[in-house]
Image (cartoon, helix red, strand yellow):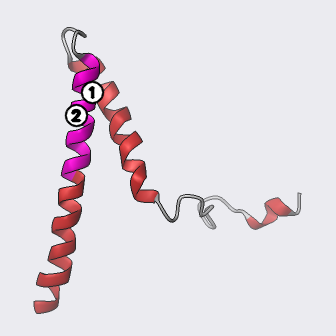
Amino acid sequence: MIALLGFIPFVSPVNFFQTWWYLLIIPLAFGVSVIYKAIRLPRLDAYWFQVWLMTGQIVLVMLLIAVALALFVQLVVPAV
């Protein structure tokens, strides 16, 4: 009981994912792809191929956005 007194959700979060939190985009993208493709595909012949393709697209675009924002913050913002 005393060990639980140090943890208050949303005020003092558990730091379990602190070092590799950015890798959680992969299961998030996979879950979004599974649900979106299950609703949108008229036939489920190539369902898993479409799911993995969309997952890869989401992760790739998020990576490109992160690189673009990092370059913007490092190069453009200091010049202003």
Amino acid at circle 2: Met
In the rendered structure, the answer to whether residue 7 lies left or right of residue 79 reads right
In the rendered structure, the answer to whether residue 15 lies left or right of residue 68 reads right
Which residue lies at the image location 38% right of the left edge and 33% below the top edge? 31
Q: Helix, strand, or loop for circle 2?
A: helix
Mark pair 1, 2: CA separation: 5 Å
- Which x, y percent locates residue 2? 88, 63
Which residue lies at the image location 22% right of the left edge and 15% below the top edge? 46
Mark 1 packing: few (<14 Cα in 10 Å), some, or many (20+)?
A: many
- Which x, y percent locates residue 18? 52, 64
Tag 1–tag 2 contact (CB < 8 Å): yes
Q: Is residue 80 visible?
A: no
Amino acid at circle 1: Val
Q: Quadrant of the N terminus?
A: bottom right
Image mark count? 2
- Residue 42: assigned label: none
- Which x, y percent locates residue 29? 33, 40
Name the one closer to the observer, 57 or 40.
57
Whether residue 35 is situated above or below residue 63 in the rendered picture: above
Residues drawn in magenta: 47-61
In the rendered structure, the answer to whether residue 22 lies left or right of residue 61 reads right
Name the one closer to the observer, 52 or 8.
52
* Residue with the mark numbered 2: 54
- Which x, y percent locates residue 62? 24, 53
Q: Main secondary structure of the magenta part?
A: helix
Whether residue 77 is situated above or below residue 39 in the rendered picture: below
* Residue with the mark numbered 1: 51
Mark 2 packing: few (<14 Cα in 10 Å), some, or many (20+)?
A: some
